[in-house]
Amino acid sequence: MSGMKQDNPVIKTGNTKEFQRHLLEKSLAMRAQAYQAHTKAKLLTQAVMQIENSKKNLQTLNDTLVYEIGVRKQAEEKILHMASHDNLTGLPNRPLFKDRLETAQRLAVRNRGKLAVLFIDLDGFKAVNDNLGHKAGDIVLQEVAKRLRESVRDSDTAARMGGDEFIILLNGIECNGDAGVVAEKILAALKKPILLEGQIAKVGASIGIAIFPDHSHDSEKLISYADCAMYEIKKSGKNAYAFHTSGF
């Protein structure tokens, strides 16, 4: 106590009221400091929570945007696929086939290579439609598309032209005989019976072949020449293949 009396000027004067006022002021100041510290801590905690909430909201927004972009991209890809593929068989359609043919031609020119176009028309398909119905006909077309895909390489293209007509692009063949080998493989695959609901459907194929660059450098002419060769086979007995000749 004696130390306090010596250090505190208020106690030295012996003024009790002054001493009490001094203690009160000091107490109030300490409380104010404590309140300010508590307030600052509370505000800091709130600020941190707001930042964390903002980060969570931003992450949620980002996740939503990523999802919506993904959905839109899938929708665009689906629309693009529908525009370039046959709805029934899933095969490329004529515009996509022509685009791939022209791309393959440019590559073949650079590499001094060859390619083949095989135009395919089903034999006996009308009888399937007439006797078994259009639903059965659709199943047959789907099975034919499957067998065509299995008969060619991944680097080749099997497409549907429409109706019961299909077309094949063979890339990078070594010689014309390679196209004949594939045509024979396709004929053998399509001759196998197609099992339907308790019934069996049988179809065959007539195939015309045109070779780039032997027969033409023009994509439309290649398709047309293969088509003409196919019709010659159809007139002469069906279920076979023939190469384009100048006589067709």
Image: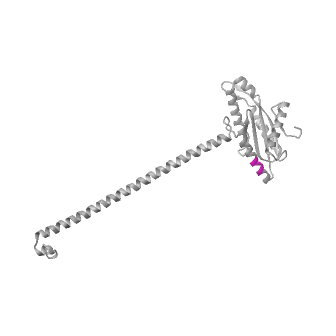
What is the x, y in percent for residue 80?
Answer: 64, 43
Left/right placement of residue 67 relative to residue 185 reads left
Left/right placement of residue 56 relative to residue 86 reads left
| Residue located 11% across and 68% down the image | 17
Dividing the picture into quadrants, the one containing residue 143 is top right
| Residue located 15% across and 75% down the image | 9
> On the rendered image, what quadrant is the C terminus found in?
top right
What is the x, y in percent for residue 102?
Answer: 76, 47
Q: In front here: 49 or 164?
A: 49
Colouring used for the render: one colour
Q: Which residues are magenta?
A: 102-107
Q: In front here: 62 or 240?
A: 62
Q: Is residue 167 magenta?
A: no
Per the picture, the main secondary structure of the magenta-coloured stretch is: helix
Dividing the picture into quadrants, the one containing residue 32 is bottom left
> On the rendered image, what quadrant is the N terminus found in?
bottom left
Left/right placement of residue 33 relative to residue 200 reads left
